[in-house]
Image: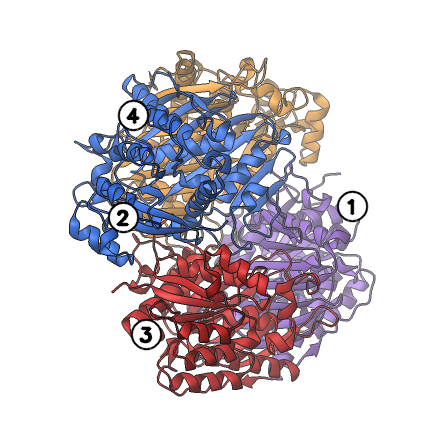
Chain colours: A orange, B blue, C red, D purple
Amino acid sequence: MAARLRMGMVGGGSGAFIGAVHRMAAALDGRIDLVCGAFSRDHANCQATGAELGLGAERCYPHLDAMLAGESVRPADAMQCLSIVTPNHMHVPMAVQALRAGIHVVSDKPAGISLGEVEALGEVLDNCDAAYCLTHTYLGYPMVWQARHLASRPEFGPIRKVRVEYTQGWLAQRAESGNKQAAWRVDPELAGPAGALGDIGSHAHSLAEFVCGSRMDSLSARLRSHFEGRALDDDGEILFTLENGATGSLVSSQVCVGDENDLTIRTYGTNASLEWRQMEPNSLIERRSDGVVLVHRAGVDKPLCEEALARCRMPSGHPEGYIEAFANLYRSFAFAIDGGSTPSALGLPGIAEALRGMAFLEAAVASNSAHGEWQAIKAPATGPDRKGLLA
Amino acid sequence: MAARLRMGMVGGGSGAFIGAVHRMAAALDGRIDLVCGAFSRDHANCQATGAELGLGAERCYPHLDAMLAGESVRPADAMQCLSIVTPNHMHVPMAVQALRAGIHVVSDKPAGISLGEVEALGEVLDNCDAAYCLTHTYLGYPMVWQARHLASRPEFGPIRKVRVEYTQGWLAQRAESGNKQAAWRVDPELAGPAGALGDIGSHAHSLAEFVCGSRMDSLSARLRSHFEGRALDDDGEILFTLENGATGSLVSSQVCVGDENDLTIRTYGTNASLEWRQMEPNSLIERRSDGVVLVHRAGVDKPLCEEALARCRMPSGHPEGYIEAFANLYRSFAFAIDGGSTPSALGLPGIAEALRGMAFLEAAVASNSAHGEWQAIKAPATGPDRKGLLA
Amino acid sequence: MAARLRMGMVGGGSGAFIGAVHRMAAALDGRIDLVCGAFSRDHANCQATGAELGLGAERCYPHLDAMLAGESVRPADAMQCLSIVTPNHMHVPMAVQALRAGIHVVSDKPAGISLGEVEALGEVLDNCDAAYCLTHTYLGYPMVWQARHLASRPEFGPIRKVRVEYTQGWLAQRAESGNKQAAWRVDPELAGPAGALGDIGSHAHSLAEFVCGSRMDSLSARLRSHFEGRALDDDGEILFTLENGATGSLVSSQVCVGDENDLTIRTYGTNASLEWRQMEPNSLIERRSDGVVLVHRAGVDKPLCEEALARCRMPSGHPEGYIEAFANLYRSFAFAIDGGSTPSALGLPGIAEALRGMAFLEAAVASNSAHGEWQAIKAPATGPDRKGLLA
Amino acid sequence: MAARLRMGMVGGGSGAFIGAVHRMAAALDGRIDLVCGAFSRDHANCQATGAELGLGAERCYPHLDAMLAGESVRPADAMQCLSIVTPNHMHVPMAVQALRAGIHVVSDKPAGISLGEVEALGEVLDNCDAAYCLTHTYLGYPMVWQARHLASRPEFGPIRKVRVEYTQGWLAQRAESGNKQAAWRVDPELAGPAGALGDIGSHAHSLAEFVCGSRMDSLSARLRSHFEGRALDDDGEILFTLENGATGSLVSSQVCVGDENDLTIRTYGTNASLEWRQMEPNSLIERRSDGVVLVHRAGVDKPLCEEALARCRMPSGHPEGYIEAFANLYRSFAFAIDGGSTPSALGLPGIAEALRGMAFLEAAVASNSAHGEWQAIKAPATGPDRKGLLA
């Protein structure tokens, strides 16, 4: 039952950031082997990256077409799944191509650059046997699962309010020219309709929905860009409602100088509240209306819900972090493939989250254009695996 | 130079909360003696409160009129200033009455229940020699002064963004019936147009303006009440702009179960940012764009700006808190009276802050009624001491 | 029942530190009036300090003798209690003098400079009607009382281990010459046999005994001085045992550069443990063997034991600190005088703590001289109020 | 330059803890492949563990002898290094066996069960070409390197004092019978002369030496066991001196109920101090004598020393933890093997640390037996790579 999953990667050459993170996350638990890659359109970069990773030159391909073709004729060791870590505009086309070739897909987020193309991806998925996972990394943290668990209990009371904030500072200066990471993220052709909101606000959106167990259904947005010629938002605030009747606020910014990767969520029921900060991810604070304050701590030795425990590797006090959370997605994905489950059954964000995320981005951009007018968020939901994590 | 200031108090009888805080704040530094009071319209409560405080029965008056009359005929030990700690609707009428009698006034906030009446108060002030202070307690904290100092330095860069949040949980349940504090705060006749926003959002507003050194000039508000029949807001979010071009967000809520008195401000310049949390008031975190993180700590032995040092009593590590911050307002007020300065010269919020605070509340209520439409905030500013702290 | 207590002070002139703290602590709750003082042997300093405090020149005395004599002939407003805030060597002689004159005494710690003289003080106390309180400030914190309460419950289990640390950095440089505070503290004639250990280690000792509800009965000490000619310890570690069978360690240092006033205690039972840090005094962390972690928070609205609640003034989230803890001692003292209770009945450290503290210091110095040999700590315990807080 | 290192493992079958951690640490960076193992003397467990890891049955050996023999005849894919994750008493014999076969060794700590056998290991190492690394995990944390760097700068001043504490709670109850991890750790035959001190105190010792850049040369120890029949210490305190003249204290306990994995080090120079807590490993606090407090934060985007940066994988705010620190040891080991450097040149603890660690344990046990008498710590130091990290 423990065959290792063979993975290819597109994107992630030298100079890229998130590709290396995906590779560490995939490697950590010994379930997945990276066997091939189209790491860069730059031949030398691609080959050097592959060599660095211990791959033979014949498994380093110039582009995805070549990789799909080359791997399809290998006898027993061909790629079974593809990790897509390119700029956003290539996510959907490449996912479609791979899925149609029967290759499972792990895609970086956001899913694509328009709701329309993600809907098309959904249709492809409905008609193929391959699986799709969207890497909303923060849903891999055990204490996020514990938060969702606690917030769903009757004693928490109905959720009234959620506050989610995701702030960074790295675009506080004009970073576009010298920084490859920054450059494509502020180009609408490559990044899609939203900047910081697509890059990190999309994580905040998925986290809020996941912890509250409810879909965001309307919003009012104010987005800003702080530099002449920076076409996409680098900063913004969103007020929203959830289907369960709660209201919320979301802050998304990459001009908050000095903020590192400051993702925080606070959820308030009628009887208790929860606070989780990604930068200290192993603690979850619960405050009850009777004045009791509890700190739930991550660790295999702790009284946590089953889903949280399954995402811990170590006893408490041995801090696990971002890479471990990311690895939880890859590990669950390998289990899903191996065991024939759908990814969402194993707690993985997939096409349902992809659709809701894109609908969120498009509604936010529309509201901002209309001076903050409230917009409904309508994510299409059809197909067998489209229920997603909120089913 | 060290005559002690003789103070009377209106409100603050047994069962009230903030009156006792004002008394401790006034007493702490040995500059002010409480000499008389009209603590309650309930005669027994008034007398018992006075006795408890060591006052003779003859200095415990049934109401303000009697106190002003009674004190006016005392030879040498009459009340010189009045502390007003009643529900909001009495703040302005009583302040006017006292000021006209030549009595200095310290008023709890918000200043009143409408911008109109506070404007009238301003006119009275323009035409009398007595001083007026509005107790925006949080402006008494030394690290708030240090934040303002750091944010004003050229190396901080222009301020781009401010995030201020003030959340409590005590109105998460329907507390109105059993709780005297809650009851008047949700009654528009007594509290004015705003509930939580008047009670604590007004502090958040003054703190944001003070730290940023700039006036709030427009806003969009969403306010909510979570109980049938609770006429005023218990929860809300406000997006705003400052005159200096910064944008901001403000959260004000008293239904955040478990939150105690959670006032936090974060200010972002182009080169550095600051974070201060009232619940750990002796630390101020500065994060710089070069990656350096500093923790500025309160204490007379610390490298702080002069205004911050003047508000510390102890070496670092001997925590000072809410009462000390409050006492800083009273101490400065005593110095101002003693030395003939205007309160604002000594860093005290006064009529200028009162006017801006009421204009803020009225704009927020108007915006909320108009489904979040942006509103300009226009605070009248005339008269000699109306410049206030942002002059 | 609320007559205000009239207090005199000896010591605390301009340039002194702790005198001003005592005055704020005494003033905070409006129970005590400072009516006279012998603030300094320097006449000008004494008069200036008194004037600054609003005292007439006739109540500012050149020394304690004069004050006792002068006050004894006042009709109705004479000093009733004396606050002693001089260097250590005067604590006992002055306390004895005041007690014999029927004046209640509040003394700064340590009680004196030898166990012998504190024993003599005990005999005086046994034969007079006046009360005596030793200001172990940290026993005024509500969460210290909550810790003691939790540690005493059966579900905590027998106490196995206690770790207490009190570190500061202000003697890391040779501060003696320029600094009045430093100068006398390192002079055995004025400070007694111990330096940092007497100044702050004595607090750590009393805190450990108080929280654990058990007397320290043996110890091994290593003390050091880091400067040529600094006659008393500025740094040390002590291993000890308690009568209840627990073992412990105590760190006391004033050369820990950068440490502010870093007093921490951790207590371990068989089933749970507690951690309290003076620099964030409003939280007390409890960790249970089943993995549950609780944060007990100070505040009148919190589920705390009666003794802790009685030492809170504000709802949670309005931080109270060092001065409030100190004021709790003065307030309890005023209540004890007013109500005829003994101070220890109201939770105040007195002669029993004074004796144990001096015995602790002498044992530590002896052990250090004997290269860390274990020493028994034997505090004499006779007389009606000598039971103290551990009775 | 990027051939992957082929690793075998002895120990680490199902039911063991640290073996899985070693495997994740080795896998994380894609430099090392696990190719074979003798995971358990229980055949079924060994095979099941191997299968779970994707190893063929022919690479799962019944014991080390068989593995060395079996691998020695493989053509091109044989094991190159061995990870030893057995109970302590097998560390040295197995390391010797592997080294003599030319296999590089990574050994869990402590190095062995007596100084004598570790000296013998040192002689083997002196006479072979294979490398040896002792997994003092905490030396893999970037902020530990940053601490060492800051403490070594002239502006830090000579180190006066170090306080190191390592406490856990999992032996607070009698865990020996039901818990495989606990059972061997309290058996002197398997664990060596020390219990908690060998298990975690040894980490505290190496951390203190490493951060201070100086060897521990004398100590006084008090050790205790809290259960009848528990032959080895579960709790203790050690006072010590370093060669550089600093004094220190070390707490090591596994009966501190509720403490998770609480390793903290504080180092005091004459001009600044440092504090690092393993449970929040990405922050290092520096406090300077001028009152400035800095928080150094981990991250590839932060101003850190070269050695710290080399041990970060992510930008700040993406928390890295225990597994990443552990992986830093494995990655450096792979680099050392690949590049022909000695491990200590790449910052890895080796035989020098092994010898000092064992000498420390034996001195502590001797001191405890002699009622705390001070003992010199003498670690033999000969041979080419015996300088170690303090060279």
Residue kind at label 1, given as amino acid type: Gly
Q: What residue is disc 2 on? A: B37
From the viewer's perspective, tell me whether residue A28 is left or right of residue B365: right
Q: Evaluate whether residue D168 shows in this view.
A: no
Q: Nearer the viewer, residue B185 or C106?
A: C106
Q: What residue is disc 4 on? A: B117
Q: CA distance from mark 3 to mark 2?
A: 34 Å
Q: Nearer the viewer, residue B80 or C13?
A: B80
Chain name for mark 2: B
Give percent across and percent down for residue D272.
Answer: 68, 54
From the viewer's perspective, tell me whether residue A282 is left or right of residue B270: left
Residue kind at label 3, given as amino acid type: Ala
Earlier sequence position, callout 4 versus callout 2: 2
Give the quadrant of the C terminus of chain A. Answer: top left
Q: What residue is disc 3 on? A: C345
Q: Mark 1 falls on what kind of element?
A: helix
